[in-house]
Amino acid sequence: MLLTEPEIAEHLSQVPGWVRENDRITRSYGIRYHGGVAMIVHVADVERLVSHHADIDLRWDHLRFSITTHDAGHRLTAADFELAARIDGIARAHGASPL
């Protein structure tokens, strides 16, 4: 179910550090390359369980996640914010620093 603008603002306030970029939310974390690979594997396992996936960009010193709901026409849904919160928890567990 697509979120209204007020609902998007409310959900975004619950995941500090995530930024809205049109119809997606994004966040970057500082983490060295091999730590980033391990974090990606952990995120991918959770994504498989919740049937929702982020676009992931791995660089030598950071990871960037971008989330939108592809099945909803690349628009924002509650599932995007739920995945963002899960990624935040995984990032903490891997010692990734917020950027």
Image (spheres, helix red, strand yellow):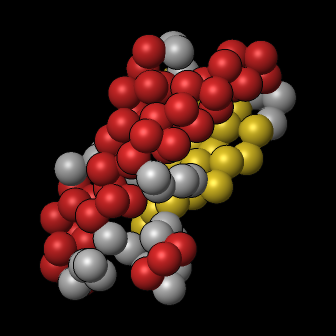
Q: Is residue 44 left or right of residue 58?
A: left
Relative to 56, does residue 91 appear above or below in the rendering? above
Relative to 96, does residue 52 appear above or below in the rendering? below
On-image quarter of the C terminus: top right
Rendered location of residue 52, percent (x, y)? 47, 55
Task: Determine if residue 64 is in view.
Answer: yes
Q: Is residue 76 left or right of residue 31?
A: left
Q: State the residue at coordinates (64%, 31%).
A: 40
Rendered location of residue 81, percent (x, y)? 32, 55
Q: State the residue at coordinates (33%, 41%).
A: 85
Q: Is residue 6 left or right of residue 53?
A: left
Task: Determine if residue 98 is in view.
Answer: no
Taking depth in this image into account, of 27 and 86 the one nearest to the observer is 86
Badge count:
0
Relative to 15, does residue 80 appear above or below in the rendering? below
Where is residue 75, by image quadrant? bottom left
